[in-house]
Image (cartoon, helix red, strand yellow):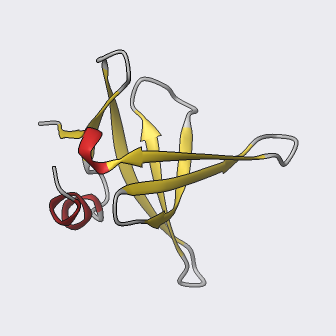
């Protein structure tokens, strides 16, 4: 999928997509958008196979999603998801 299709479709709450891992397995994720009273929107990606694993989207770059999260000690973890490795999940 190219960035234009992914970007347009992903910015909807509840959009599900698969991500192809290096071993060929596809993991399913769900996009969610939270709007706070202040008007701030937080976009996050959650692993559908886990109740806890979720990362926030810091930016949607030209080739990938840039993700981040913080653990209980306040350490920041970053990751990238390439658009070309994303597949549509029905």
- Seen in the picture, residue 52 relative to 73 is either above or below; the reply is above
Q: Residue at x 16, y 49 (%)?
A: 1
- Seen in the picture, residue 76 relative to 11 is either above or below; the reply is above
Image location (x, y in percent) of residue 63: 34, 58
Image location (x, y in percent) of residue 84: 25, 45
Q: Quadrant of the C terminus?
A: top left
Residue closest to the eye, 45 or 76: 76
Q: Which of the 4 image quarters holds residue 87?
A: top left
Q: Residue at x 41, y 65 (%)?
A: 60
Toward the right, the furthest residue is: 73
Residue closest to the eye, 83 or 89: 83
Q: Residue at x 58, y 80 (%)?
A: 37
Residue closest to the eye, 59 or 22: 22
Q: Residue at x 42, y 55 (%)?
A: 65
Toward the bottom, the furthest residue is: 38
Report whether 29 appears left or right of 7.
right
């Amino acid at each position: 999928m190219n960035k234009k299709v992914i970007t347009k479709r992903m910015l909807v709450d509840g959009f599900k997509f698969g991500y192809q891992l290096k071993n060929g397995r596809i993991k399913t994720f769900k996009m969610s958008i939270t709007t706070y009273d202040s008007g701030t929107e937080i976009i996050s990606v959650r692993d559908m196979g886990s109740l806890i694993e979720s990362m926030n989207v810091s930016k949607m770059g030209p080739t990938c999603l840039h993700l981040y999260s913080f653990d209980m000690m306040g350490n920041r973890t970053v990751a990238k998801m390439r658009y070309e490795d994303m597949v549509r999940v029905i």
